[in-house]
Image: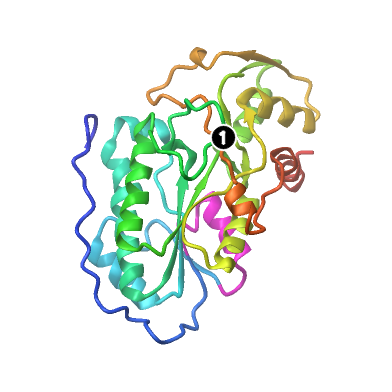
């Protein structure tokens, strides 16, 4: 469905007796969305016992198909990294956004509840509108500014309605192995010009996917449930990240700070979605500072 408000609502979930109740599965964690950046990092972080499913293995929008596929695999833990992450496409095509981020998330959560499996669902800082002027806590009321954020919020609520024991992890400004993320785009722009203009008034918590994956595993080990923020420590603007990326890469390119209003797009971006991660830190799960993560990303990528 393109444009307009989506009519999708999570279905009423009727829970049956968990298939795995009172027995211990010998299967390792199952990573959904395993071919994406975070999915690949989670496969590595959870070790050789982990397995993965990606696009093409089953249709996440098919409720019966999801349950049948996951029933065959019978995992004890599901980490759902599958998502529609093209923010501008989500704004223009609500069906694209809702299929993975809301409908699919609901199906996975229902399947986990029926199978008696633990579930980790990955969400986003974009569930917030960016108007607070301080890092967001888990207790802050979501107010998405764009449809991507709204579809992810729908997914969060559907997951927790179907499986209140689920762990929902909100991440921010993810980058890592693969193309398309912000540091990779900065390097691409720098290869084509001697000066780049970057928004100095748009802030988030840049997060190395490998750090997030290890943090997710650490949170799972604590046995917690509910909503947790997990992101690179600190807060940075797009300008800050671009400047640091080029400095670490030793590229002689000028970065000019400008307003985000210079870069209009179909989906509005919130001004400040830095995440307060003290709840996870209180459990001993604290991701490294964003500059440290960025330096390791560039080093492991052979760039610096």
* Residue 41 among those drawn in magenta: yes
Residue 303 located left or right of residue 154: right
Q: Is 193 or 242 nearer to us in this picture?
A: 242
Q: Say which quarter of the image contains residue 107.
A: bottom left
* Residue 9 among those drawn in magenta: no
Instruction: Report crowding for label 1: few under 14, some 14 to 19, many 20 or more residues within 10 A (C-alpha).
Output: some
**Please, which residue is most extreme toward the bottom here?**
23
Q: Is residue 26 above or below residue 279?
A: below
Q: Which residues are magenta?
A: 31-49
Image coordinates of residue 266 in percent, x first then y, are 37, 23
Q: Is residue 85 above or below residue 253?
A: below
Q: Is 292 or 285 nearer to us in this picture?
A: 285
Image quadrant in which the C terminus is located:
top right
Residue 210 in sight from this viewpoint: no
Q: Residue at x 75, y 41 (%)?
A: 295
Q: Residue at x 50, y 55 (%)?
A: 35
Q: Say which quarter of the image contains residue 127.
A: top left
Q: Disc 1 on helix, strand or loop?
A: loop
Residue 86 in sight from this viewpoint: yes
Q: Residue at x 65, y 56 (%)?
A: 285
Label 1 sits on residue? 135
Image coordinates of residue 282 in percent, x first then y, are 63, 55
Residue 286 located left or right of residue 123: right
Image coordinates of residue 32 in percent, x first then y, are 44, 60
Q: Is 166 or 243 nearer to us in this picture?
A: 166
Residue 186 located left or right of residue 91: right
């Amino acid at each position: 469905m393109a444009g307009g408000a989506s009519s999708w609502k999570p279905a009423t979930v009727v829970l049956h007796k968990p298939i795995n109740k009172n027995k211990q599965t010998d299967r390792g964690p199952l990573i959904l969305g395993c071919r994406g950046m975070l999915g690949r990092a989670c496969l590595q972080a959870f070790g050789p016992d982990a397995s993965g499913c990606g696009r093409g293995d089953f249709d996440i929008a098919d409720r019966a198909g999801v349950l049948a596929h996951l029933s065959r695999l019978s995992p004890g833990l599901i980490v759902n990294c599958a998502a529609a992450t093209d923010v501008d496409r989500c704004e223009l095509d609500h069906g694209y956004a809702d299929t993975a981020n809301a409908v699919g998330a609901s199906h996975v959560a229902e399947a986990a509840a029926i199978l008696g499996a633990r579930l980790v669902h990955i969400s986003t800082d974009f569930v917030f509108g960016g108007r607070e002027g301080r890092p967001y806590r888990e207790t802050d009321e979501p107010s998405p500014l764009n449809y991507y954020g709204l579809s992810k919020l729908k997914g969060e609520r559907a997951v927790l309605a179907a499986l209140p024991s689920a762990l929902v992890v909100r991440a921010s400004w993810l980058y890592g192995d693969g193309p398309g993320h912000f540091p990779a785009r900065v390097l691409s722009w720098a290869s084509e010009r001697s000066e780049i203009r970057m928004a100095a008034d748009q802030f988030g918590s840049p997060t190395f996917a490998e750090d997030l994956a290890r943090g997710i595993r650490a949170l799972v080990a604590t046995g917690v449930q509910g909503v947790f923020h997990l992101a690179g420590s600190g807060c940075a603007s797009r300008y800050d990240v671009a400047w640091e990326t080029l400095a670490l890469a030793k590229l002689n390119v000028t970065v000019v700070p400008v307003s985000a209003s210079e870069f209009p797009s179909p989906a509005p971006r919130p001004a400040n979605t830095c995440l307060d991660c003290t709840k996870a830190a209180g459990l001993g799960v604290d991701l490294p500072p964003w500059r440290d993560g960025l330096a390791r990303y560039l080093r492991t990528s052979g760039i610096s």
